[in-house]
Amino acid sequence: MINDDKIIRGRGAQHITDNRFNEATYCRDEIEGLDLEPEIEGKTQYLEVFPKSIVNKVDSPDLRLDYSINPYQGCEHGCIYCYARNSHQYWGYEAGMDFESKILYKANAAELLRTFFMKKSWKASPIMLSGNTDCYQPIERKLKITRSLIEIFKEFQNPLGIITKNHLICRDIDLLRPMAEEKLLHVYISLTSLDDKLRSKMEPRTSSSKNRLKAIEELSKAGIPVGVMLAPIIPGLNSHEIPALAKAAAEAGAKAIRHTTVRLNGKIAEIFSNWLEKQFPDRYHKVIHQIQEMHGGKLNDSNYGRRMKGSGEIAKMISNMVKLGEAKHIKKAGLPNYNLDAFRRPGESLRIPGL
């Protein structure tokens, strides 16, 4: 564990966890009686990896998507609640500080996607960018892997979904606008709080709330269908903001509102609890108990159908507030259906529906 008396500024995790796949773990107890702390890198490390495939099949019935692409593993945004932290352990890292300071990037992602789309077995289907970690995290400004992927989507006219909490997505409006015109694009901006003091603690390296609302506005004005994802809603921290979040998102141009509630699966429970006790000691027990109430007395419910939205009275109240916010502020809520007939490979003519 990192020094409990010190808050690491600019990072979400304040805790180093054991990797459940590793036999060796960090230990602070030395034979000499010294209490040493593991060294923590101040600067983020970027490590190139070379995957053989890039499109992932999504099997979860809780998610409204069949396929996803993650150009990055790990995420410098450092969101304390992020469920993707657990997946970093498969790479030999821990889910706390390593997740946000050791970023793996897939430089060959666009090449792999082109190869995938050229397969005769592929039939047009929406693919989500950021199924696990944010495709517009800070290093994307330099590497432009996400932009290179969008170029392939545009070339093949395959439907694309994007979810992000970074205003950087507006850099790519020149590519996104023509895809939207062909009904090939859905965008969701993740919005968790209008209180930037809270946001900076929960999501230390993300775009500000103001800039996320600005992104919704810019995308909407460009004719790009954009919704807002209130995720996660954490009772006792940001749940009271739901009405204000819905109103602000709608005024910026959002055409749909979705939400999830926080679930602390795997190592996330340890990381989040340590963070909460440091950052909000006066609210610790209230927040933890309300999270437990939403998940049958536990911090996490792994059952499909319940795990993303929770159960019980608190979860019902949250769901009702989101529905009310959307109904009150958005007329004809929803994003347009994807166009599945525009897909084409180089050299192929455009398919005409019904022929």
Image: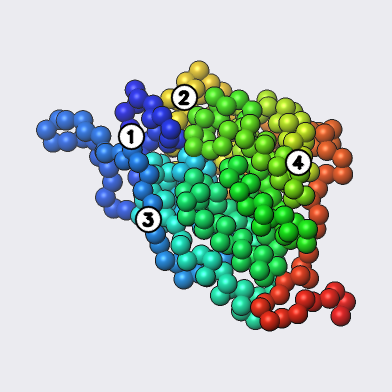
Residue of label 1: 1
Nearer-N-terminus badge (3/1): 1
Q: Is residue 221 left or right of residue 346?
A: right
Residue 254 has which mark? 4
Give the quadrant of residue 339: bottom right
Q: Position of residue 182 (x, y in %)?
A: 78, 62
- Quarter of the image for the C terminus: give it: bottom right
Residue of label 2: 279
Per the model, the C-alpha gap separating discs 1 and 2 is 15 Å
Residue at x-position 74% and y-position 28%: 243
Per the model, the C-alpha gap separating discs 2 and 4 is 31 Å
Per the model, the C-alpha gap separating discs 3 and 1 is 25 Å
Identify the secondary structure beneath mark 4. Answer: loop
Q: Nearer the viewer, residue 151 or 79?
A: 151
Q: Is residue 12 left or right of residue 289?
A: left
Q: Position of residue 290 (x, y in %)?
A: 60, 29
Figure colour scheme: rainbow
